[in-house]
Amino acid sequence: MSVKQIPEGFHTLTPYIIIKDSQLLADFLKKAFDAQEIDVVRTPDGLIRNAQLKVGDSMIMFAEAISGYESMPTGIYMYVEDTDAVYKKSPGSRRCFNNGTSQPVLRRTQCRNKGPMWQ
């Protein structure tokens, strides 16, 4: 019997982000995009050691930055059906802005949270 190399629910490419304040990212993804928490492993002091969240049909994985595994800039492009609805739903609207165009194909919302930007 062969072993399935791509786990159920994953695609060929899955982003893995190392980030400061990783709990803020988890909260943001759940609030703005209705992300489902699949698995979260924490350190004894409560930091996220490894998290798997499902956003739409895709998985995202991340962990808290620690010594030896520093935070790094990351960009992810995400497609949504209704950019304006996501913008309105995003926690802390001061962190999010639309690009101002009325052309649906070009509509974008960018969100920042202590450095990371989600677009």
Image (cartoon, rainbow, N blue to C red):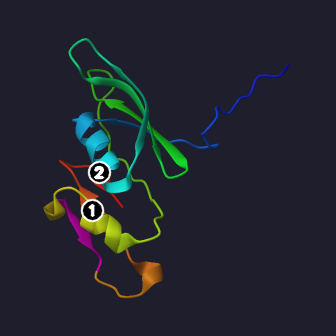
Q: Is residue 18 magenta?
A: no
Q: Is residue 38 above or below residue 36?
A: above
Q: From the top left corner, tell me how far across and down residue 74 is, in percent.
A: 37, 48
- Highlighted magenta segment, given as a residue range: 95-99
Residue under circle 2? Answer: 31
Of the 4 image quadrants, the one containing the C terminus is bottom left
**Amino acid type indicated by mark 2:** Lys
Q: Is 46 placed above or below 95 here? A: above
Mark 2 and mark 1: Cα distance apart in space = 7 Å
Which residue matches tag 1? 89
Q: Quadrant of residue 101?
A: bottom left
Image quadrant in which the N terminus is located: top right
**Left/right of residue 90 with respect to residue 75 in the rendered view:** left
Residue lying farthest bottom?
A: 102
- Element on which disc 2 rests: helix
Q: Position of residue 64 (x, y in %)?
A: 29, 29
Number of numbered callouts drawn: 2
- Between discs 2 and 1, the one toward the N terminus: 2
Along the line of sight, which residue is nearer the eye, 101 or 37? 37
